């Protein structure tokens, strides 16, 4: 999927959709931020900077401080693809995030969404 157009999409244009999905289901924005930070290693200031500077998804993930090693525990289907079977690493990271936000929207417990990670609230 090299060169897929989603890679050039600004993260700041995707983020409001993540927030809207959570809010429609009665979930707080903080939960969306928590899963983004858990997956990518960004802190709150880093996330704000990524939103402010207009970086695209490819750059957003390339500049992520540290992808969570428990990300490989994320399984499921998103957009008709099993995330664990996606071969392109960037597309897999994007779909991991999509799946996590879907889980927030469905009201799953944060401990389950974060794959039991005791270091994250």
Image (spheres, rainbow, N blue to C red):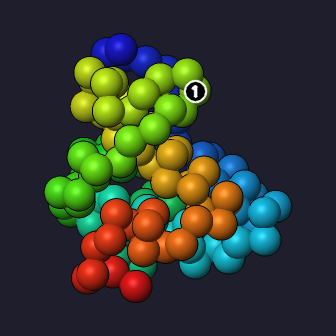
- The spot of residue 55 in percent (x, y) is 43, 48
Q: Tell me if 16 is positioned left or right of 30 in this view.
A: right
Residue 15 picture quarter: bottom right
Is residue 54 at least partly visible in the picture? Answer: no
- The spot of residue 102 in percent (x, y) is 60, 51
Kind of element beneath mark 1: loop
Query: How many tags in the picture?
Result: 1
Quick one: 119 or 111, which is closer to the camera? 111
Is residue 30 at least partly visible in the picture? Answer: yes
- The spot of residue 86 in percent (x, y) is 33, 24
- Taking the spot 64% from the left edge, 73% from the top edge, the residue there is 29
Quarter of the C terminus within the rendering:
bottom left
Q: Tell me if 3 is positioned left or right of 29 in this view.
A: left
Q: Residues within 10 Å of mark 1 (few under 14, many from 20)?
A: few
Relative vertical location of residue 89 with respect to residue 48 in this rendering, above or below:
above
Relative vertical location of residue 80 with respect to residue 60 in this rendering, above or below:
above
- Taking the spot 65% from the left edge, 66% from the top edge, the residue there is 107
Quick one: 46 or 26, which is closer to the camera? 26
Name the residue beneath numbered marker 1.
79
Residue 23 picture quarter: bottom right
Q: Tell me if 81 is positioned left or right of 89 in this view.
A: right
- Taking the spot 25% from the left edge, 31% from the top edge, the residue there is 89
Quick one: 101 or 118, which is closer to the camera? 118
Quarter of the N terminus within the rendering:
top left
- The spot of residue 87 in percent (x, y) is 26, 21
- Taking the spot 17% from the left edge, 57% from the top edge, the residue there is 69
């Amino acid at each position: 999927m090299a060169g897929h157009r989603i890679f050039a999409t600004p993260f700041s244009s995707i983020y409001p959709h993540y927030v809207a999905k959570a809010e429609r289901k009665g979930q707080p924005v903080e939960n969306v931020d928590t899963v983004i930070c858990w997956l990518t290693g960004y802190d709150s200031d880093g996330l704000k900077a990524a939103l402010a500077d207009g970086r695209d998804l490819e750059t957003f993930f390339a500049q992520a401080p540290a992808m969570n090693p428990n990300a490989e525990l994320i399984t499921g289907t998103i957009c008709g693809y099993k995330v664990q079977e996606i071969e392109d690493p960037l597309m897999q990271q994007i779909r991991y995030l999509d799946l996590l936000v879907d889980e927030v929207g469905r009201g799953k417990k944060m401990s389950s969404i974060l794959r039991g990670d005791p270091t994250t609230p």
